[in-house]
Image (cartoon, rainbow, N blue to C red):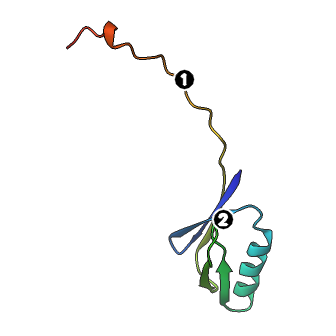
Amino acid sequence: MIVHRLTVDGKDYFLPDPVDELKSRILSAVKDGGGYVTIPPLRGGPGVDILFSPGMPVTWTQIEVGQAEPEERPAFNIDSFDGI
């Protein structure tokens, strides 16, 4: 699963893929001199309206989140413990 991190003025917002339409809306708002864009939530809910304006620092980061397989550990045997 790919998750995108949008950092706006130091605050992080995590978004599911795809984000192409959202990027276009943010770019349009900045080109128009500023405007509100609704940032959708990662897992349901109303989202957040952010006022984007020229000069506002915005950073996109793409993060791949996979299902990590559990690490196999040797079984702990209390009978083999010699004490401290």
Position of 67 relative to 13 (above/below)? above
Point 66% across, 81% down: residue: 38
Q: Which residue in the protein does label 1 denote?
A: 72
Q: Earlier in the sequence, mark 2 or mark 1?
A: 2
Q: Position of residue 12 (x, y in %)?
A: 54, 67
State the SS at label 1: loop
Q: Quadrant of the C terminus?
A: top left
In the picture shown, does residue 76 fall above or below 48? above
Q: Residues within 10 Å of mark 1 (few under 14, many from 20)?
A: few
Q: Is residue 16 above or below residue 80?
A: below
User: Residue 62 got which mark?
Assistant: none
* On screen, residue 74 above or below 48: above
Residue 27 shown left or right of residue 57 in the figure:
right
Q: Residues within 10 Å of mark 2 (few under 14, many from 20)?
A: some
Q: Check disc 1 and give the amino acid type.
A: Glu
Residue 54 falls in image quadrant: bottom right
Residue 9, how many percent across, how many down? 53, 75
Is disc 2 placed on a helix, strand or loop?
strand
Q: Quadrant of residue 50?
A: bottom right
Residue at x 71% of width, y 50% of height? 1
Is 77 or 38 nearer to us in this picture? 77
Question: Furthest residue to the front?
Answer: 79
Q: Position of residue 20 (x, y in %)?
A: 79, 69
Q: Alpha-carbon distance for marks 2 and 1? A: 32 Å
Of the numbered discs in the image, which one, if any, rests on residue 15?
2
- Most extreme residue toward the left is 84
Q: How many marks?
A: 2
Amino acid identity at mark 2: Leu
Q: What x and y, as percent, mark residue 15?
A: 66, 65
Q: Which residue is drawn at the image coordinates 74% and 73% (left, top)?
A: 23
Query: On the image, which quarter does residue 42 sit in?
Result: bottom right
Is 24 on the left or on the right of 62, as rendered? right
